[in-house]
Structures are given as structure tokens and as C-alpha cells.
Amino acid sequence: MAQKITLTGMPKTEIRDCNTYLSFEMTEKGGPTAPKGIPFKSTSITYTVFVSKKQFKNVDIDLQGFKNTKLLVQGEPTLDAPIDVCPGEVGVICMQIQALPPKVDKPKKEEKQLEFLPNGTEAVIPLDKIVLEGAYQTSVPRLEKQEMVAQFIQKNGNIDKPILIDKETNILKDEFSRYFVARKMKLQTVPVCYA
């Protein structure tokens, strides 16, 4: 039965042209702990991947951003490659290679924020679009009021009442304490109603 190995991760070196094939290094780490009863744990190993030019041409990889591309490599291990072409600890003869799509993290705070919208909400807008004028630029709401709003945000992920703004100019008209605490707690978007 053939030995198989699967590597997932980003290349550690640029790709090298070796006439009929290409090569590069990848490093894989083992788990942080071994199964109970085994006195040692796995360590990171550097693999040299050998891939045919024909295979590599079929994969949509930009050579400029090669080191920033997450790859899935499936192949067979080899210990017979000479050290001058295999600087890694183990060689991998690539049978299949593909570029993995980048992982997109969705901001969890925004999702939670939209779960609760207070009564009277007419729109949800980015907090930084609200304009402060006059006394609002320098004043600070009473501490009791700030704490009350902060507790509500922690519990529900959003403010308890929409912020009153001018529809044309986005100038804050009322609910400054809610604006102040939302900014302090780094909310990205807030519910608003229009004057």
C-alpha cells in the first residue's frame, strides 16, 4: 500500500525552478500534546515539495503572492532526494496541489448588534457617520447614565433607544449618552431615528 501525506499551510520559501519540476518548502507542526502514555510529542517538520510544472500550471496561483497563498498538497514522502535539491527534512512528491481560498472572518459584534433593534429604529448606520456639534463635542454624560447604557449594551449587544439625528446632515440631536457609550464600547453601527 502506498504511503500518503497531506500538507496544509503556506509555503515557507519562494518557488524554485528545477528544470522539469518546481520545488518549495512547507513546515507542518504536530499537536501540542501526545496521546496519554506516550512520553514525547510531535515537533515541526520542514518538507520540500516537488511538483511538476504541468500540475502547477493547472493551479491558479499568482507567483508574486505565492508565499501568502494557503495550499493543500497531497503526495508521497521520499527520503531519496539529494540534499542539494531537498533542503527539508522530508521530500514530498506532489500528486495533487490546490490553492485554498482565504478564510474570511465575519465580525461577531456586528451580527450580535443586529439581533436587537430598539423600537422606533428607522435605520442602522455606522457610528462614525454621526456628526457632533456645539456642547456635545466637549461634554461627558453622567456616570450613572453611562453605566446604565453600558450594561444594556453588554446584555443585548446594542443600545436601548435609537439615537436621534438630523436626516440630511446626520447631526446628533438627542440621546448623546447612548452615542457616547456606543463609541466608548467600540460599536461599529448604531440604530438611529430622524428628527
Image: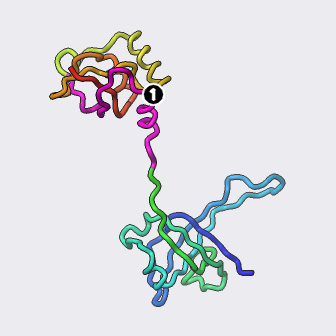
Across and down, in percent, residue 39 comes to 80, 56
The image position of residue 46, as x and y in percent, is 59, 69
Q: Residue at x 76, y 58 (%)?
A: 40
Residue 10 horizontal/vertical position (percent)? 50, 64
Residue 130 located within the stretch drawn in magenta? yes
Of 80 and 156, nearer the camera is 156
Which is nearer the eye, 110 or 56?
A: 110
Three-letter code for the amino acid on which mark 1 is drawn: Gly
On screen, residue 105 versus residue 193, left or right, reads right
Q: Observer-nearest residue: 182 or 122?
A: 122
What residue span does the magenta drawing correspond to?
105-132
- Quadrant (top left/top right/bottom left/bottom right) for the N terminus: bottom right
Please tell me in which quadrant of the rendered image residue 82 appears. bottom right
- Residue in view at x 45 percent, y 28 percent: 157
* Image: 140 above or below 109: above
- The foreground one among 184 and 193 is 193
The reply, left or right, for residue 6 in relation to residue 14 is right
Location of the C terminus by quadrant is top left
Left or right side of 59 for 189: left
Instruction: Establish if 130 lies above or below 92.
Output: above
Query: Measuring 45% from the left and 48% from the top, which residue is drawn there?
Result: 105
Outermost right residue: 37
